[in-house]
Amino acid sequence: MEIGELYSRRQLDEAEGEQIEALKARSQQPIPDPDDWLEEELRRNILMTSVDSLLNWARRSSLWPAICFPACCAFELIATAASRFDISRFGMEIIRASPRQGDLMITAGTLTWKMAPQVRRIYDQMPEPKWVIAMGACAISGGIFASSYSVVPGYNRIIPVDVYVPGCPPRPEALLYGIRMLQQKIARMSLITQGR
Amino acid sequence: MTVALSGKKIARQIEKHFPGGIIESSPQSLVVDRESLLPVATYLKTAPGLDFDYLTAITAVDYYDYFEVNYRLTSLKRNHSLVVKTRCYGRDNPSLPSVVSLWRGADFQEREIYDLFGISFEGHPNLKRIVLWEGFQGHPLRKDYLQW
């Protein structure tokens, strides 16, 4: 059975016109934004917080590492930055070639005394506030080279270290955990006491 | 495949040109007297049939009584290789003639041996420490080097 046998073409057009008219009649006012669940202050875009929490939130949420990868731990750091572990989940996918744009130094590798002045210089060029993660056994204590004539027994001889991540080399999960720990540390910093 | 030449055979050939220049020889290598190192090296580089135009590596060994320096030579033209050794005595200021004038590749390697063994190379254009820094005390690859 065809539609044309029950309703004429004209009747179908008239039914469609009625639907449009009805929708138009009940759509004369704009629908309000669904913000009635917000507090009155939020609806007026006012946030009440301390300067510390705001600053610390901004600082810990976009840590930009400066490049300091003197040895083999660098490959675990590269794996951490690549797609499987994806360091950008923590707001730090931009690993800076210039220390002037970085605020986190991940010291991935053995440091020799001949290289030490350059690392100190990179650290000095980073703008305040800045943090250091010692990644791997060599960065913590010199590792298996601790008693060598040429290796620095730990980066903390050269620069202050905030978080130590053990391993030879540490797995990317361990480095990410270290980064999370550093973020928790930053969250507790205060402008008055300067954190450290 | 590069053919490793017999040290004994080459030693007999060198002995004809430089009598007394060879201290000892074996199928693996030959040991040259310190004084005739440079003439023998020049001969090995230029003699037709030998043509050792490439210095693969220089290494040094501390045998307490003397330092032995090994020159691993290769001929890219003839596709053969040879190990030449020489010895220098004394621990206070051992020295050897430099071969930088023959093979430029010896430059950094002689500096490294100077740095880590304390062997001076006479005639080297820029003999200073390369791996360690100026002011470092001692030469760490010597057998009697003790840090503490």
Image (cartoon, coloured by chain):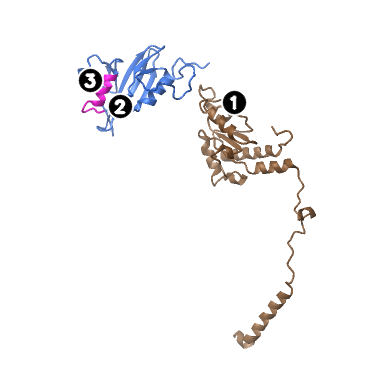
Chain colours: A brown, B blue
Of the pair A123 and B45, the residue shown nearer to us: A123
**What x and y, as percent, mark residue A168?**
54, 33
Mark yes or no: residue A166 visible.
no
Of the pair A145 and A65, the residue shown nearer to us: A65
Q: Quadrant of the N terminus of chain A?
A: bottom right
Mark yes or no: residue B40 visible.
yes
Q: Quadrant of residue B128?
A: top left
Magenta segment includes B45? yes
Do circles 3 and 1 both sit on a common chain? no
Residue that extends furthest to the left in the rendered view of this protein: B16
Disc ID at residue A106: none
Disc ID at residue B14: 3
**For mark 2, what is the residue?**
B73
Magenta segment includes B36? no
Is residue A45 rendered to the left or right of residue B50?
right
Tell me the CA gap for discs 3 and 1: 56 Å
Q: Looking at the picture, which amino acid does disc 3 mark?
A: Ile
Query: Disc 1 is attached to a residue of which chain?
Result: A
Of the pair A146 and A53, the residue shown nearer to us: A53
Task: Name the residue located 73 percent from the left edge and 75 percent from the top edge.
Answer: A25
Query: Disc 3 is attached to a residue of which chain?
Result: B
**For mark 1, what is the residue?**
A157
Q: Which residues are magenta?
A: B38-51
